Amino acid sequence: MNKKTQTLLASLTAALFVAGCATVPSVVELNALTNQIVKTSFRDQGIVKTDRLLNTDETNRACSEADVAGKPLEESAAKVIEAANLKTVKWPSDGKFIGDWKEGEKIAQSGRGLTWTDDAKTVNGGNCYNCHQIDKKEISFGTIGPSLYNYGKIRGVSNPNDPASKAIVEYTWGKIWNAKAYNACSNMPRAGHMGILNETQVRHVVGLLLDPKSPVNQ
């Protein structure tokens, strides 16, 4: 840790100490100090740029401020954020929502891409197992998100191309593309919106979740 970072951390500690005796620092003041610390502590390396940490949009700012305040986002504000994010969802250009579940499984298993050790040409993975159980046979998975095992079967999708399943198919696509369109402060990455996955990859992950032949629905 360099001297400038130590100084900033000391300032933050002092601010919090004073807060116990006087006026609590505002969220804006704490955010400004945090940004200073990030700018000082982090550096661009490889394909990873500090701008990705600092240049957050209104959605992330609102959720971060609510988190700092220790209370959930107000329902009215959440609805506004969800509506704005829903408008950013890019639906399949060819109208095809369902891809190859086998390719979807590869994407779900892969955590490559977007790290400083990756080449800019590295194909990104979805790293889905980091947060979800998907295949019952998989022994290593995270629990930050809900289990997705039997995702399509539970929702009654026996044929994802059936018009009766349209709402679930569209929701699944939208959730993967931009999770905050359905839950303002969702922890799930906005895979399509943030360029983590492209349209074809999203299509394959939808196939993994909804195709009756996928191990997800066995």
Image: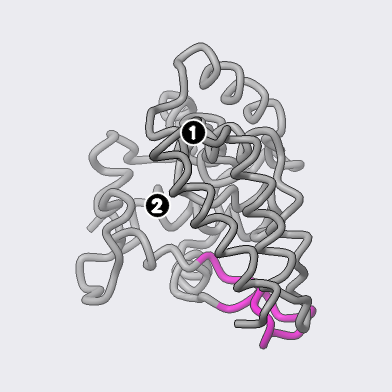
Could you tell me what secondary structure mostly forms the magenta stretch? loop
Q: Compared to 123, does 194 lie above or below?
A: above
Callout 2 secondary element: helix
Q: Which residue is mark 2?
A: 209
Q: Position of residue 218 (x, y in %)?
A: 22, 58
Q: Residue at x 50, y 64 (%)?
A: 104
Q: Which mark is residue 24?
A: 1
Give yes or no for residue 60 being in the magenta stretch: no
Q: Residue at x 65, y 51 (%)?
A: 33
* Mark toward the start of the polypeptide (2 vs 1): 1
Q: Residue at x 65, y 60 (%)?
A: 196
Q: Is residue 160 left or right of residue 137?
A: right
Give the residue type at disc 1. Val
Disc 2 and disc 1: Cα gap in Å? 46 Å
Give the residue type at disc 2. Leu
Of the pair 15 and 166, the residue shown nearer to us: 15
Q: Position of residue 181 (x, y in %)?
A: 56, 31
Q: What range of the chain is rendered magenta?
A: 112-126
Q: Is residue 107 left or right of residue 36?
A: left
* Figure quadrant of residue 177: top right
Callout 1 secondary element: loop
Residue at the top extreme, as displayed: 76
Residue at the front extreme, as displayed: 21
Query: How would you rate the neighbour count of disc 1 (Cα within 10 Å): few for under 14, some for 14-19, many for 20 or more?
Result: some
Q: Compared to 208, does 129 lie above or below?
A: below
* Figure quadrant of residue 69: top left
